[in-house]
Image (cartoon, rainbow, N blue to C red):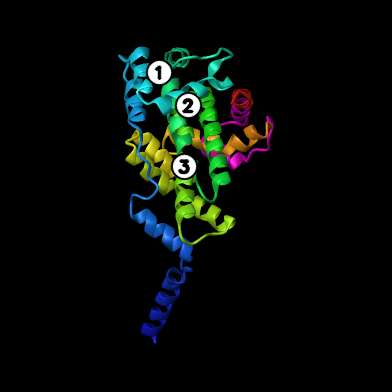
Amino acid sequence: MTYELSVNISKSILEPLTQLPPPSPVEAALVQTLEGGRAALPLLPHVASQALELANNPESSIREFAELIMRDPPIAARFIATANSALFSRGQTIRSVHDAVARIGLGGARDLVFQVVYASTVSGLERFQDQVQASFDRSVLCGVICRVGAPLLRLNIADAYLCGLLHDIGESRVYRILSEGKLVPSPEEARALVEKYHPRAGAELAMRWALPDEIVQVCRRHTERGAPSSDQLRLVRVADMIAPHVREQSESPELAQAELDELGVSADQVRTIIGRSIEAASRL
């Protein structure tokens, strides 16, 4: 009798682990594709990988950086066009790559190169194009928030903009896989699958691009709860929290105290970041 009771108790403990619902056909196909390791993994242009190295080298010059970008005419053209946006140009027309790099600096130029490269990966989808474009726009906004927020939170993060820009890059990768698949998910199922798998998909892409480990970890772990394990994760999670308020230009939102405590920020700090980010985002 005692033996039977222990067996029944063991079964009752283990049963929930064996009753998980099986994945849908779309999810199963997505997982199989991701496990292949190569799907929707665009190569990082040479100019972008070299830009990362030059920007992190204190001996690099503006001339070297400009010459690097001009070796890739399509990127150079988009670079100048984006540099003339209000966010970067500061009211003055930029006519050359050299002028752009001189005005925004090596770090800003590196960030702009990656924004251009990221933008080039979000077009040409048969389905979910609007969702991918919205994800990219939000990523640019998070990059701006991280750039604004890092000094306000006294965080010395050289790659603040890239952390915000690239932390959700896995979303576009998952959407592209779903768009190219034989099985077509509903918008609701697609969104759920993107939420579930984009951290892994983004981290794999960041690793393929040989980005700094801090950015790989931001891609992989930004959806985790609990106290952030790095300043980069803390900054990105703050950006994720306030991005909707910046987009809606709401400078005094209701903020969950538990989340503020978890991130180690005050309501006043967050409101300051929101206000300054709204001002910066108005120049996008």
Whether residue 261 is in magenta: the answer is yes
Q: Main secondary structure of the magenta part?
A: helix
Q: Nearer the viewer, residue 181 or 146?
A: 181
Q: Position of residue 244 (x, y in %)?
A: 62, 38
Residue for point 58% across, 55% down: 187
Tag 2 residue: 78
When asked about the image quadrant of residue 160, the answer is: top left
**Depth check, front residue: 271 or 209:** 209
Label 1–label 2 contact, CB within 8 A: no
The tag earlier along the polypeptide, 1 or 3, is 1
As helix, strand or loop, the secondary structure at mark 1 comes to helix
Q: Nearer the viewer, residue 214 or 71?
A: 71
Amino acid type of the residue tagged 3 in the rendering: His
Disc 2 residue type (three-letter): Arg
- Quarter of the picture holding the N terminus: bottom left
Residue at the far front in the pictured view: 73
Instruction: Tell me which amino acid carries mark 1.
Output: Leu
Residue under circle 1?
106
Residue 228 image point, x, y percent: 45, 39
Residue at which label 3 appears: 222
Residue 263 image point, x, y percent: 52, 37
The residue segment tinted magenta is 251-274
Name the residue located 46 percent from the left edge and 71 percent from the top edge. 19
Label 3: which secondary element: loop
Q: Nearer the viewer, mark 1 or mark 3?
A: 1
Work out whether residue 223 can be spotted: no
